[in-house]
Image (cartoon, rainbow, N blue to C red):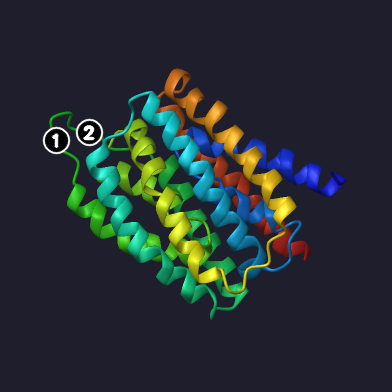
Amino acid sequence: MTATLLIMTVGLFILSVASGMVGLGVAFAAVPFLGFFLPDLVHQVQPLSLLLNGVTALFAATGFARSKLIDWKPALALTIVASIAAPAGSWLAQYTGQTWIWGLYLAAVVFLAARMFTKDKPRDPDAAPNLRLALLLAVPIAIIAGMLGVGPGFLLMPALILVGYHPKVAAGITAVAVTLPSFTALVPHLGTAQIDITQAAFLVVAGALGSFFLGARLTSKFVSGPILKRIFGILIVVMTAVKVITLLTS
């Protein structure tokens, strides 16, 4: 293993632990991180990130399922909707300039950071979450996420909280709902993807171990809902700062 691959593997493992704790695949955090090592956003970073996202989300979902933190009806419904919509975003990415994609990525991050650090209004414990609204939001969310190469989880989880789901339940639903869309979003990239198989293998193993053995289990056993939101918000802010620095120094 080269020094570069070692750094990538260790870094990806740490990011996958944090992502697993909020029920996400690792792609959202992996995109700016891999951008340090891989120059082509659409043909190198995005396909690898989507592959990692699908695998780590699958393991995270397994962890949440074992802890009985998944509401299966909305999880499966959102999986179907997002899986159909996500490839459209990946297809659009093939014909969009990288500068525009990074700009969209940063805009989404800023919005989410503000949203996750804003205190929620008191929830009515007797009010049912609005699944219909969540399904409507899942369509543009999946398209945008597919275009960014990150899977829909980073937008889907705050959307679920917004329509009335508890943060822990939202994390469990998200872990399931982003797995298949990550793989369907990968399909439009298959003809042009430039992935090093050895590199991908190390990163996939690191991501799976981090998201399942630590991330999802830490959430299910030790992390409360409000803390979960703060962790997600901090992760977003850190990754935004990293990407801004990368853009300014490139």
Tag 2: amino acid: Arg
Element class at badge 1: loop
Do the numbered discs 1 and 2 sit on residues whose CB atoms are within 8 Å?
A: yes
**Callout 1: 10 Å neighbours few (<14), some, many (20+)?**
few
24 vs 238, nearest the viewer:
24
Element class at badge 2: loop
Q: Disc number at residue 157?
A: none
Mark 2 sits on what residue? 123
Location of the N terminus by quadrant is: top right
Q: Left or right of 159: which side holds 113?
A: right
Task: Where is residue 4? Give x, y as percent.
Answer: 83, 49
Mark 1 vs mark 2: in front: 1
Mark 1 sits on what residue? 127
51 vs 18, nearest the viewer:
51
Tag 1: amino acid: Ala
Is residue 49 depicted above or below 3 in this figure?
A: below
Residue lying at 53% horizontally and 49% vertically, measured from the top left: 53
Q: Left or right of 130: which side holds 175?
A: right
Task: Where is residue 148? Give x, y as percent.
Answer: 52, 63
Residue lying at 13% horizontally and 30% vertically, measured from the top left: 126
Q: Left or right of 77: which side holds 111?
A: right
Task: Where is residue 9? Give x, y as percent.
Answer: 73, 42
